[in-house]
Image (cartoon, helix red, strand yellow):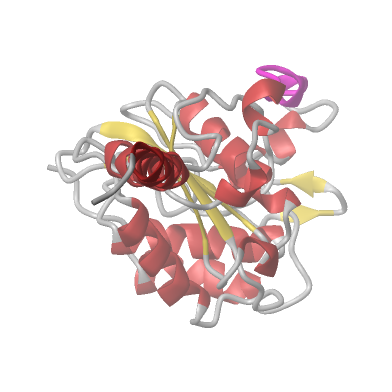
Amino acid sequence: MVSRYGFAVVFAVIALSVVALSPVIADRDDDDRWDHKHSIVSHQRLQQVLRDVVAEGNGGFDLNMWATVVDRDGVVQTVVFSGEDRGDQWPGSRRISAQKANTANAFSLPGLALSTANLYSAVQPGGSLFGLQFSNPVNQEVAYKGPAHRSGTRRDPMVGGQIGGVNVFGGGLALYNADGKLVGAIGVSGDSSCADHNIAWKVRHALNLDNVPAGVSATGDDNIVYDITDGTSASGWGHPECAGTERTIGENLPTTHPVGPMP
């Protein structure tokens, strides 16, 4: 027979166990809620595609990467990394990837896609879009929200927030679904800016979110443009070259990974 004191001890142990387990249960519930069926791409799918692409030759330093997807309102939907741990890629590139996604979404239209790489020359002094890089500042509250250990998980603290920010080097691309609808953008960061663009392009292609209507590149899409000579871009949309083989890979992307046909 158990005494009243014994019942009290048992009840206390059970109560403490429930309290200890509740954060785990809550985390699991929140994970399921964030990774909902209406997302442009699931966390699991984006991370696997990113890892597959990073394992390929992209030029640059062959580093691990961050990738962020925002919806058409600039709200962060998904944040992933390609390494085994959040510290396996540059920590600063997490926010840069989100900033690139915001930029590509903010300055692309249903009928015209502009990659972040396309904006580099246009925002330089004397360029047609000079000053753009100072507009739409990063939302500091969203960018630095914690806890840090959730970075790159389905419960990344940026998810659900409007990140803001303008970034004008390679790695950000608008996303157009199979119906040709502009649904948001992806930002990739963690290597040279030229390699970032190549990786973002390949990831978008693998996700079938590259049904681009038109762009400013010579191939009529939003590919990176290498036409800067003595500091001046012939087209006005040029991006600087990087030190490795990124240019060759990038210029071949419309052939090796062509954008999808418009409906």
Give the magenta range. Answer: 129-138
Horizontal arrangement in the rendering, residue 187 relative to residue 139 (left or right): left
The number of numbered discs placed on residues in the rendered structure image is 0
Q: Is residue 125 above or below residue 26?
A: above
Q: Residue at x 54, y 67 (%)?
A: 250
Instruction: Using the rendered image of the protein, determine whether residue 149 is visible from the camera's viewpoint.
Output: yes
Q: Residue at x 49, y 41 (%)?
A: 216
Q: Is residue 180 above or below residue 81?
A: above
Q: Could you tell me residue 208's position as x and y percent?
A: 25, 55
Horizontal arrangement in the rendering, residue 231 relative to residue 184 (left or right): right
Instruction: Using the rendered image of the protein, determine whether residue 128 is visible from the camera's viewpoint.
Output: no
Q: Is residue 257 above or below residue 217?
A: below
Q: Could you tell me residue 168's position as x and y percent?
A: 68, 39
Q: Quadrant of residue 174?
A: top left
Q: Could you tell me residue 213's position as x and y percent?
A: 30, 39
Q: Could you tell me residue 172's position as x and y percent?
A: 54, 45
Q: Residue at x 53, y 67 (%)?
A: 82
Q: Quadrant of residue 77?
A: top left
